[in-house]
Image (cartoon, rainbow, N blue to C red):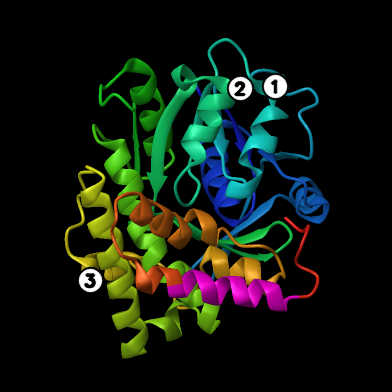
Amino acid sequence: MKMKICVLGSGALGSTIGGVLAEAGSEVYLIDQWADHINEINRRGLLLREGSTDRTVKVEARRDFTGIGPADLIIVLVKSFHTRQAIEGAGAIIGDNTLVMSIQNGLGNDETLAEVVGKERLIGAKTYVGGVLLGPGHVIAGTKNKYTYIGEFDGTTTERITKVADEFNRAGLLTTISSNIVGMTWDKLLINVATGALSGITKLTYGGLYKVKEIEECAVAAVAETITVAEASGVTLSIKDPKEAWFKASEGLPDEFKTSILQSLEKGQKTEIDFINGAVVRWGEKYNVPTPVNKTIVALVKGIEYGMQDYLGKS
């Protein structure tokens, strides 16, 4: 029996994951407040582009939860600074057996979700799938050779985690059950640290970002700081070499790929920098690990945000 899955925050990545799951037969609802995006999906279907080819996927898209009922799985993909508000407003789709899984960028979202719905509902996840919004109802889907890792926070392999993994794998989303999902969270943070903010600061897509030696050197230094912070906090990482994170970030993604921070800045929106490089700085301070490169990157992004006269209050 296929799962009923609600994607809470259906931008580029949410639409990509939800669309692929719907295409494979899951009962998927894309939830988002962007009216044009939702209307286009309901009018013509979701357009997923891979390479130079678009395909249309039929999937339900909503701005609220009317008529959906309890979900088997809620995938949380709102911006990190909206996590609490989003999950507090999602009571209508939370039933007795509903699981909640964050695939958001950065650190801190699982703790926020646990405070609202209870830790017992949570399963952990990190994905290397990517997506780029081309316009309302139209996304580039970066799923080729991109892995997703899910797991229980206590490291056990349960029936419920196996069911979710099977659902994802059936859809062609390469998914592995991890006994160290906390470490995987930090592994994904290394990827975000490597390219997210630097793409936003330079306004370069991956095609340009990976052609500038000095950008690579800066990225590797930021990742190295993050690895040191993780080790100081007792986290076991699978990525040991900072250069591995730099190269892994671009695997399977097209030259025109834009990081979420770049996409936010291009739309004049606030970024998630506080939950990515900013989280490295905070954890570094907690464990007395210097993080000058990450601190500089945070300052630059915040300076760009400040320079955008109308970004405050946008989501």
Residue type of the residue flagged with mark 1? Gly
Q: Is residue 225 magenta?
A: no
Stretch of the chain drawn in magenta: 296-308
Circle nearer the N terminus (1, 2): 2
Marks 1/2 in contact by CB < 8 Å: the verdict is: no
On the image, numbered disc 2 is attached to which residue?
71
- Number of on-image labels: 3
Question: Toward which corner of the image does residue 70 lie, by quadrant?
Answer: top right
Circle nearer the N terminus (3, 2): 2
Circle nearer the N terminus (3, 1): 1
Relative to the observer, which residue lies in front, 161 or 54? Answer: 161
Viewport quadrant of the C terminus? bottom right
Secondary structure beneath dot 1 equals helix
Question: Toward which corner of the image does residue 181 lie, by quadrant?
Answer: top left
Which residue is drawn at the image coordinates 58% and 46% (left, top)?
19
Residue type of the residue flagged with mark 3? Lys
On the image, numbered disc 1 is attached to which residue?
91
Which residue is drawn at the image coordinates 26% and 22% (left, top)?
157
For label 3, the crowd category at 10 Å Cα-Cα, with few meaning under 14, some 14 to 19 and many 20 or more, is some
Marks 3/1 in contact by CB < 8 Å: the verdict is: no
Decide if residue 3 is in sight here. no
Disc nearest the viewer among 3 and 2:
3
Secondary structure beneath dot 3 equals helix
Alpha-carbon distance for marks 1 and 2?
A: 10 Å
Relative to the observer, which residue lies in front, 169 or 279? Answer: 279
For label 1, the crowd category at 10 Å Cα-Cα, with few meaning under 14, some 14 to 19 and many 20 or more, is few
Picture disc at residue 243: 3
Residue type of the residue flagged with mark 2? Ala
Alpha-carbon distance for marks 3 and 2?
A: 40 Å
Which residue is drawn at the image coordinates 80% and 70% (left, top)?
310
Q: Position of residue 188 (x, y in %)?
A: 36, 53
